[in-house]
Every structure is written in C-alpha cells, then in structure tokens.
Image: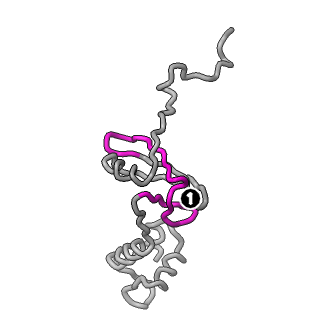
C-alpha cells in the first residue's frame, strides 16, 4: 500500500478506501500486496464510471460537475494552431467560465448549435505601441 501511495502521491488511507471499494489484494495477509494489473483494471473501471461525455454544443462545467449548455448559446473561438481551436463560454446554470478544445474541422457542425465569435488576439507583441507604461520615459 505504501508503494502505491508513494507512486501516485496520495495518502495510504486512499489506498485502503480503494481496497474497501473493490480493489482486490493478492491475499488477506500482511503486508497487503496488490498485483499491478489488478490496480490498473480497478483505476480504469473507476475512471470509466466517473467519465461524462459532452454532446455537441455542450461544455463540461467544473462547478456543476456536469455537461452543460452555454449561456445564450454563445461561445468565443480562439485558434491555437492550424488544426486546433479553443472555445470559451459561460455555463447556462451557474455562469462559470467553461473551456473546450476541438478540431477546426468540427467548427461548422458546432456553429449550427452555438453562435461562435472569434476572439481577437491580445498579445502585446502584435500591438503597434506595446508599452502602455510611460512613467519611466524622460520628458
């Protein structure tokens, strides 16, 4: 148990809770030994049970802990690369910012469900006058 806790950076009590929830030990003697394949199968099953998939037009809200529609059916789009776009929107229930990364090829299908607006780049190096602080300039 101590090795698993150290490997994942968790407390030993977490491993004990996993044993109570269904992680199988090799036998019931001490020290408690757990086979690596049993641990991997348990964690994979646990992750699959907790996973929630978003339908088209939905984002995952971390405050609600559920897939939610966007507020006003709107989302902002910023392009990360030639094939990837990042979407930002507000949750329709709690108005928390939500983010989602999708392929640029999937944008037309999403545009039928959500009003997409392109966000202008706000990088300082793209501005004509990058320094707004003029306190140190000599007069």
Which residue is more in the foreground, 104 or 124? 104
Residue 123 appears at what percent x and percent y?
Answer: 50, 31
Q: Is mark 1 on a helix, strand or loop?
A: loop
Magenta run includes residue 74: yes
Magenta run includes residue 75: yes
Which residue is more in the foreground, 96 or 10? 96
Residue displayed at 42% across by 91% down: 28
- Where does the C terminus fall, quadrant-wise? top right
Is 75 located above or below residue 127 in the figure?
A: below
Residue 97 appears at what percent x and percent y?
Answer: 56, 52
Q: Name the image quarter holding residue 134.
A: top right
Q: Name the residue under label 1.
A: 92
Q: Residues within 10 Å of mark 1 (few under 14, many from 20)?
A: some
Q: How many labels does the image show?
A: 1
Residue displayed at 52% across by 28% down: 124
Segment tinted magenta in the rendering: 57-85
Which residue is more in the foreground, 19 or 58? 58
Residue 63 appears at what percent x and percent y?
Answer: 58, 62
Residue displayed at 48% across by 38% down: 119
Is 24 located above or below residue 40 in the figure?
A: below
């Amino acid at each position: 148990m101590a090795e698993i806790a150290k490997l994942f950076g968790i407390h030993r009590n977490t491993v004990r809770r996993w044993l109570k929830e269904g992680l199988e030990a090799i036998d019931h003697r001490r020290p408690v030994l757990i086979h690596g394949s049993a641990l991997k199968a348990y964690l994979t099953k646990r992750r699959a049970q907790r996973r929630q998939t978003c339908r088209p037009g939905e984002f995952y809200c971390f405050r609600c802990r559920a897939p939610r529609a966007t507020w006003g059916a709107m989302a902002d789009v910023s392009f990360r690369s030639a094939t990837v776009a990042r979407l930002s929107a507000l949750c329709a229930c709690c108005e928390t910012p939500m983010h989602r990364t999708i392929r640029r090829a999937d944008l037309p299908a999403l545009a039928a469900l959500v009003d997409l607006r392109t966000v202008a780049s706000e990088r300082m190096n793209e501005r004509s006058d990058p320094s707004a602080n003029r306190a140190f300039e000599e007069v």
